[in-house]
Amino acid sequence: MTFIMSRSFLRPAISRAIAFAGLTAILIPGISVFQPAVAIDSQKDEEIREMMWNSGDEDFQVIEIPEKWADQSAVIIAKSNNLSYKKDVLINNLRYNREVHIRIKLLNQTALEKYAQFSIPESGSLANINFEYFAGFKVIKPDGREIVLSLADAVKEEKNINDHGINILKLAIPNLEVGDILDYYIVNEQEIKISTKFHNFDAMIFQLHDEYPIMKQKISFDVLRRCFINLKSLNGSSEFKVTEDTDSDKNYYYFEDSDRESTHEIRWMYPNRELPTIKFRVLYASSMIANLLPSFMGTPGVLKTNVTESELLNYVTENFKYAKGNSYSLMKYMKKNYKKETDPEVLATEAFYYLRNAERMSYLEPKTITKQETNPAPSTMYFVQMLSYFLESRNIDHEILLGVPRDISSLDDLILETELTYMLKVNTPEPLYFGRFENNSLPGEIDPELQGTKMYSINASDPTLKWRLSKVDIPVIDFEENKLTTNVKLDHLDLSNGEITMNLTKSFKGLTRVYHQNVLMDVFDFIDEEKRKFPDTQTSYSIMSRKDQERMAEMKSDYLSKKDENNLELMRALLEADYEFEIKDVEDFKLVEHGRTSENPEFTFECSVKSGGVMKKAGPNYLLDIGKFIENQVELTEEEKTREYDVYMPFARTYQYEIEFAIPEGYSIQGVDKLNMDVENETGKFISYAKIEGDKLVISTEKSYYSNYEKKEDWPKMIEFLEAAKGFNELQVLLKKN
């Protein structure tokens, strides 16, 4: 059972990390886990150890596993999660406790290596939350001997996380052998100091499958009956049982599950849509706050398992009603610069560009210089609110769209406010969507996780009191609109050592550009462009002291002096990931287009690459791995060719390669005909053409994924063009000496 804090639960700060809740994470072997406060050898530590290891739970006494799982890397014998949410008497402090207990049998060397070391923070607190952790580890040998490990044997490493000094304890699990059972627990106790009568505990997702099979697992939590609980069981997960305790004013919720097969990471599969999953959130609110706050709260102490359309409409209406005053600067800018403009598309586009500048530029320079994470983007609700208020002021027909990202669940399974994301649609002759609100987003883009989904639509041109919800289908952007074009000119072939120079030009259109923009481009590549368009662009320098400004200027100079070198290193790393052969050197990297405006929407760069390892001598001739120049292709294992789950891809897309190979003087090429392929069906295609033009071999290939989703029944059709592309990837031509 993996604990995932999914992106929608942390919007706008997106996280796909495995997590306990918010700032904490489950203890994972061999991986540093940032959890403040671990108690060692205290009296309470002893009490918790007694509670966890001597609870009488028979599931944690089992040592044998079913024969059917004997060939697995490991088997989880038992897993238990117990959570508690409560409030201190007379004061506002809240307490959140979580106990995780895992008993796992290790069956091969891979599992032994994974569980050979744990990283555990020692102590600390963050913001208004005090953390205390207790952990215990013991190894049970096949002959029944139990070896209890002490955290006192851990090695301390000083760390600094989020400007807080948190020491990390690294605990080795010595002498692990195949057949050993590792039994460990971690208990997290939090004290949350709040000054109001409201607190929203972190939302959580439990997936009932793991990379290892699970014999038995339990989830239980107790909650003060004055708390509000939203909970949804999905994809065949069983429901929770509820027990009331009037004496303690608590409700107890209990879930038990058994005999879960392992589920390894599967290509293009959304676990939350396919596997038994539970998502829930606990919220504490006084009766007064509960009546005032727009949220999906139900009845205190009663599980809320669905959200009605009227609740959703009320939530959205209330949020839009009270945020209107934030649009003042946008209104002022548009009145000053576009007072006489009447074209709805121009007005919406320019308002979007202003918001992108105003909300994303302020801290980018210092954050980039100091290599800190940039500020999370304002919520999609905020951007849509601001755009909607402006469009309303100009009487421009538009819709507010709200839905759930498809990697979380369907719209009908909405249960939490934080699952929602928003878009805006301007009803011009060709509908204009605003669905991405990041540093380099463009008008007309639709969030890839909303393409192909159903969303709720509100006619925002109506007065708020007349708002109504209707379901609409969101289009999937055509595969030709998300296109990566790569031009490769191969020359300067050195037959003596097999080196060849690639002159690359790569142009990214649509959503294909997002990753490379974020990796290869920073604020200094486009800040001048922003300042020309928005002379009043604000930066955080204005609020710095003179001393800090001088220090930042020095750091900026140092950063810029290394920028070109760093770009070459980044480019090299990307190429090494893209190609199977050796990347020896990268030179002359140049950004041609930033891809940040509707006039120039493609992100384009050039570079020169010296490569090797693509040629083998065959007597007086040479074999050239020409197929490898279309970069690595999907390689399916035999196991992957049989699929149980639907196919969820990032977006419909096309990859096009144009290759020119300068044939060395004194040689001719054989094997060109086999470079011609044509495989196409309803799901996609791989097509390649090759011919000799003068002294050059010219190749053109195109691979397209026609949609972002295919049913599992159509997976064999996808395999056809995927294997064709992989087959081309492995083709060679013969350089025959004349």
Image (cartoon, helix red, strand yellow):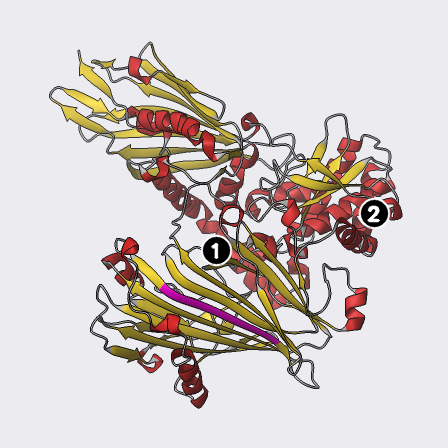
What is the magenta segment's predominant secondary structure?
strand
Q: Quadrant of the C terminus?
A: top left
Q: Secondary structure at mark 2?
A: helix
| Amino acid type at image mark 2 | Lys
Residue 520, compared with residue 126, is above or below; it is above
The reply to whether dot 2 and dot 1 touch (C-beta < 8 Å) is no
Q: Specify whether residue 157 is in view.
A: yes
Residue numbers of the magenta segment: 77-85
Quote the CA–CA distance across marks 2 and 1: 38 Å
Magenta stretch encompasses residue 638: no
The residue at the point 36 percent across, 56 percent down is 212
Residue 238 rendering spot, x and y as whole percentages: 53, 57
Which residue in the protein does label 1 denote?
Answer: 558
In this rendering, the answer to whether 632 lies above or below 537 is above
Q: Nearer the viewer, mark 2 or mark 1?
A: 2
| Residue picked out by circle 2 | 332
Q: Position of residue 266 (x, y in %)?
A: 41, 44
